[in-house]
Structures are given as C-alpha cells and as structure tokens.
Image (cartoon, helix red, strand yellow):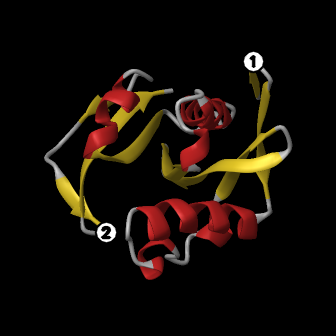
Amino acid sequence: MTISQANVMTKITTTRDIDTCHMIRKLVFVVEQGIGLEEDIDGLDDTATHLLATDNGSPVGTARLLEKGTTGKIGRLAVLKAHRGKGIGAAIVRAALAEFASRPHLTEARLGAQIEAVAFYESLGFGQIGDEFVDAGMPHQEMVRPL
C-alpha cells in the first residue's frame, strides 16, 4: 500500500525486519510514553506479521498482526512523533485490515486502543466493546470491526 501527499511518499509493506520495528516501538512506547521495554517485547513477535511504513525510504511506523481463531489482532501500532498527522497511522491500519481480509478464515479485527486513540479507531470503523482496562499502566479500550 502506498499513500502520497505533498513531497511525501509513504509505503506500507510486510517485513521480516523486526529490529527496525523494535526501534520504532522503543522510541514511541519506551522513550516517549515511558512503557517498560519488557511490556513491549512479549515473545510474540516471532509468530506475528509485521507491517513497516517508510516515508521517502526511511522507517516511520509499524504494527504487529496476530491471529487467534477467526480474529485478527492489530497491536503495537506506532508512528514516530515527527511523522504523525500525515495519515500514516490510518494507512497502517488500512493495510492491516487488507492483510486480514486476504485471509479467508478471519472474520473480524480487534485491537486494544489507548483511550486517547479511541476516536481515531472509530473513524476507521472500529467499535468499542467491553469495559476500559489497563495495559502497560495505561487505560485502554477493546475495539472490534468486521472484515
């Protein structure tokens, strides 16, 4: 998937470059948000599909895709601070949904949204389910959308 805006060419692809995904996640979750590295690196990365967003060739965002039964789980969505507000996060989510839609056994996508990101995910078709919960010391909301 490619998005383009004035002087910006962003590509989102699946990647095996987990080190680059970890670097982005560390900058966003550990450095910026103060989440412990052990909270982010949970042992599931080797079984996941990873998406990497590059902006004019430089890595700027990532997400991790997992499966459980008929559910695709989007997690670890991170966009570097200097690249937010350009539609990259939304493009990563759309790429994740397209990846899940290509897997016929999956019927829904789920994610645990940080509370301040709930409206962002609602704008992409996700609805809130269940009660607010705490993950990595931060309030989250489970969200779901059909594929």
Label 1 sits on what residue type?
Ala
Compared to residue 38, the image places residue 81 above or below, namely above
Compared to residue 143, the image places residue 79 above or below, namely below
Reading the chain from its start, which is encountered first: label 2 or label 1? 1
Q: Position of residue 63 (x, y in %)?
A: 59, 50
Residue 103 falls left or right of residue 72: right
**Numbered mark located on residue 127 in the image:** none
**Can residue 122 be seen?**
yes
Nearest to the observer: residue 58 or residue 90: 58
**Can residue 79 be seen?**
no
The quadrant where residue 55 appears: top right
Q: Position of residue 71 (x, y in %)?
A: 47, 44
Q: Position of residue 26 (x, y in %)?
A: 55, 68
Q: Are marks 2 and 1 in contact (CB under 8 Å)?
A: no
- Residue at (66%, 67%) from the top-left corner? 23
- Residue at (41%, 42%) from the top-left corner? 110
Q: Which residue is mark 1?
A: 6
- Residue at (38%, 71%) from the top-left corner? 35
Q: Position of residue 121 (x, y in %)?
A: 39, 31
Q: Which residue is mark 2?
A: 136
Label 2 sits on what residue type?
Ala
Nearest to the observer: residue 104 or residue 87: 87
Residue that sits furthest to the left in the current view: 131
